[in-house]
Amino acid sequence: MIRVDGSSDSQSLIRVRGLNKTYSRGGEKIQVLQGLNLDVDKGDFVAFMGPSGSGKTTLLNLLGGLDVPSAGSITVAGDEITHMSGSKLTQWRARHVGFIFQMYNLIPVLTAYQNVELPLLLTKLSGSDRRKHVETALAVVGLADRMQHYPRQLSGGQEQRVTIARAIVSDPTFLLCDEPTGDLDRKSADEIMALIEELVNRYGKTVLMVTHDPVVAARAHTTLHLEKGLLVEGKGSSPQSVLAGGAA
Amino acid sequence: MKFRKLIFANLFRKKVRLILTVGSFAIALVLFTFLAVVKSAFNRGVELAGADRLIVVDRVGLMNLMPISYADKIAAIPGVKAVTHDHWFGGVYQDEKNFFPQFVIDVENHRKVYPEFVVPDDQWNNYVKDRQGAIAGAKLAERFHWKVGDRIPIKTTLYGGAIWEFNLDGIYHTEKPDGDQGQFWLQWKYFDENVPSVIKSTAGWYILRLDNPDDAVRVAKAIDEKFANSPHETKTETESAFAAYFAKQFGNIEFLILSIGGVVFFTLLLVTGNTMAISVRERTSELGVLKAIGFTDRSVLFLVLAESLAIAFFGGVLGLALAILAIPGISAAVTGLLPPLLLSKPMLLLGLGFAIFVGAASGLLPGIGAMRMRVVNALRRA
């Protein structure tokens, strides 16, 4: 169950309270997020939509521990990440977050297998265990027969599948997708969304996704709109605007 | 090593750039090694100098000759075990480019003072009996394919330009393999008979061996005091000090070598540092992804440094291999102009250490930059 009013209990997998993010640009302070609240349960699939500059990617970066908020808290599976040191946050990301980027961001000089293996190099798994995990992840995304291919030898859709395999190989707590279909044609985009849906429905993964595409967003359980730093619930019977600060 | 594939994949990402950078390293290492062996060659006289030997020269300078009568007076000073004397002959063999050191030696005492030069007794005895006899170092004989019994014509550049002929009676070796085996010895008596009268009954310098090396200062002082206020005042010093002084006659070799070495070092540092900086900048987004998926700042620093060190290592090994192949040839080509150039194991290790130090130093700044890179900013460059 996804809530944006800050009324959920503490059992949520992801719990965001009073999240603020302010940037300084040329001496001017720009408030991107203005006291967001968000609760996401395990197995939820939420899409964030909004115009450019509304703070979608900023929110995703904060939820993924890639950036630190100006104020507020983010708690994931009981761990509050907002006050973690840089190195702790890195370790936390390795254990809990799977990233899927718009531009795939694969390492071009590594094969699909080696790209997917990257997160496991940070674990204590043996070589044979790593191999099992990588092969399983690539089988899940339907690329078992492309393991030794380099990114340049794959189509855009296949590259994004490798990215998804890399994101799930270490079995993270949740997946963050930043425009996962933004660089794909409609057919490939459908295939990728079907795969993400399968991860949610079959494997119980929690997915938070940023997209501009309403067709893609429609595949999520819930769509939340970000407008000028405010969260607006956009899917369901009646969209409800929640001024996060006031709702906290 | 789990990151091996990642490091090597990145290393071979731009093959031409890798080849050029490794090539720069290799060439720099050849030059570094060459400079090191030249420096070592000039210092070898100091390194090989006998701790129990003193050299006596005319206080005015090496070109001023001293009376031969000094030999007995020096020998009479307490603490002196043996005395011999040398002259510089200064000739060339067949062609001016075939220059090598020729010493006019005192056959009666030379072996007492220089026991490290080994000549078979039968050859030595033949030499002593033969006024026109000569002995050559093993490397010198090898260079000109001389063998015992050969007639060797030497054109002197100091005594009227005449050609003197010598019979090669023996070949000497040294106890240490890096000892000087490039000398040519002729006999003082034969020399004295044939030089102009102004040079007759003189010695270029005296070499004396001490009973006890601890007496060096006292004996040197006693010799110089003995000849004070005479027409030929002396300057006595240890053989190592003399060798260092002699090396300085070529100019400040050490400063020259250190200057060139410094330029090589900083050029290499800039070339490799620039390569690594470009390499890191090109991969900003990839490094951002690595950090996003859990690579720590230290891991990223390690990856950059490992690449830089790998370039340095491969370039260094290649350069040293080239130096091993090239230096004997260079040494042969400059025989007579420079002391023998010998590449020793410590020098090779020093070269490799130099390469690795440059590799680490050049990777450090780009590595720290990559380490400090904010993930969000790095991903924005995707």
Image (tube, rainbow, N blue to C red):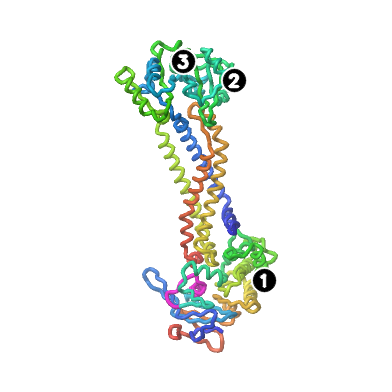
Magenta residues, as a range?
Answer: A56-72
**2 or 3: mark nearer the eye:** 3
Q: Residues within 10 Å of mark 1 (few under 14, many from 20)?
A: some
Question: Are the numbered discs 2 and 3 placed on the same chain, yes or no?
Answer: yes
Residue B258: x %, y % from top left: 43, 39
Q: Which residue is mark 2?
A: B147
Mark 2 and mark 1: span between their CA atoms?
81 Å
**Residue lying farthest bottom?**
A237
Q: As shown in the figure, which amino acid type bears the numbered disc 3?
A: Trp
Whether the residues at callouts 2 and 1 have beta carbons within 8 Å, the answer is no
Q: Residues within 10 Å of mark 2 (few under 14, many from 20)?
A: some
Q: Which residue is mark 1?
A: A140
* Chain to which mark 3 belongs: B
Q: As shown in the figure, which amino acid type bears the numbered disc 1?
A: Val
* Chain to which mark 1 belongs: A
Q: Is residue B173 above or below residue A72?
A: above
**1 or 3: mark nearer the eye:** 3
The residue sitting at 35% across, 22% down in the picture is B234
Q: Nearer the viewer, residue B24 or A31?
A: B24
SS label for mark 2? loop
* Chain to which mark 2 belongs: B
Q: Nearer the viewer, residue A16 or B211?
A: B211
B375 falls in the magenta region:
no
B51 relative to A78 in the view: left or right: left
Mark 1 and mark 3: span between their CA atoms?
94 Å
The residue sitting at 52% across, 34% down in the picture is B342
The residue sitting at 44% across, 21% down in the picture is B82
